[in-house]
Amino acid sequence: MTTALSSFIKSPQKIFFESQERNEQIIFFLRKDFVVNVPWIFFGVLLFLFPILFNLVSQSSFFFVLPEKYRLIGSLAWYLISLAFILENYLLWYFNVYLITDRRIVDIDFFGLFNKRISEAPLENIEDVTYSMNGIVQTIFNYGNVYIQTAAEMREFEFQNVSNPALIHDKLTDLVGRKRAISGHPRKNRREAPFK
């Protein structure tokens, strides 16, 4: 099931992307794990609570009392800035997407609200897939980074802080193996000497 807070969707049914080819199936639709949003969500809550706490402190003491009109305008401006901060962080999380299809990997990165970069590599070009989970938080919540080494112009893809990195690693390795078997291009052994 797809929601606005989904970070790991296996075989999504109603998700499409710009350069998707006919009959190309999305196997994994990924975002950063939702746990990585906790710091900015916590900070956003503090931003929303600050004017309330400030009004309580200023009314109960002689500390910097402003006229009512100025406090209202200041509070509205503060809430608008706080809302913009929360909305920007959410949209950056929401639109930065990693896709694994039956033909390629796609990395869609948004920088700000109006800049995006889309990188992709066919499965045949993938040479190595590794993943890492560092620290107790990533281990408990089962998220980490997946590194994909390719022979393409962009040599390394990094799926940052994605859920179930071991599952993604295994599935992607299987897809690459199947693709190479079908196309007749066996994986090169990196330890093989270049000259005999």
Image: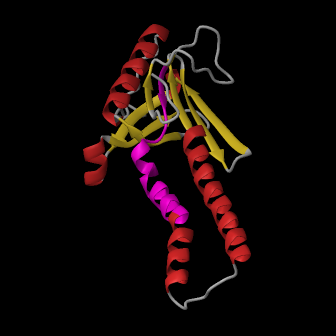
In terms of image quadrants, where is residue 66? bottom right
Q: Nearer the viewer, residue 49 or 174?
A: 49
The question of residue 37 being in magenta is answered with yes
Left of 60 or right of it: where is 190?
left
Above or below, 108 against 47 in this view is above
Above or below, 176 against 168 in this view is above
Pick the quarter of the image with the C terminus. Answer: top left
Query: According to the image, what is the colour scheme of the structure?
Result: secondary structure
Q: Nearer the viewer, residue 176 or 60?
A: 60
Say if residue 154 shows up in the picture.
no
Residue 69 x/y as whole percent:
73, 74
In magenta, the rendered stretch is 27-48
Left of 68 or right of it: where is 57?
left
Residue 1 x/y as whole percent:
45, 22
The question of residue 103 being in magenta is answered with no
For the point 64% across and 14% down, the residue is 21
Q: Nearer the viewer, residue 69 or 169?
A: 69
For the point 54% across and 65% down, the residue is 47
Say if residue 66 shows up in the picture.
yes
Number of dots carrying numbers = 0
For the point 48% across and 54% down, the residue is 41
Left of 9 or right of it: where is 95?
right
- Name the residue furthest bottom: 62
Residue 167 x/y as whole percent:
33, 28
Q: Nearer the viewer, residue 32 or 42?
A: 42
For the point 55% across and 35% down, the residue is 97
In terms of image quadrants, where is residue 178? top left
Predominant secondary structure in magenta?
helix
Residue 77 x/y as whole percent:
70, 65
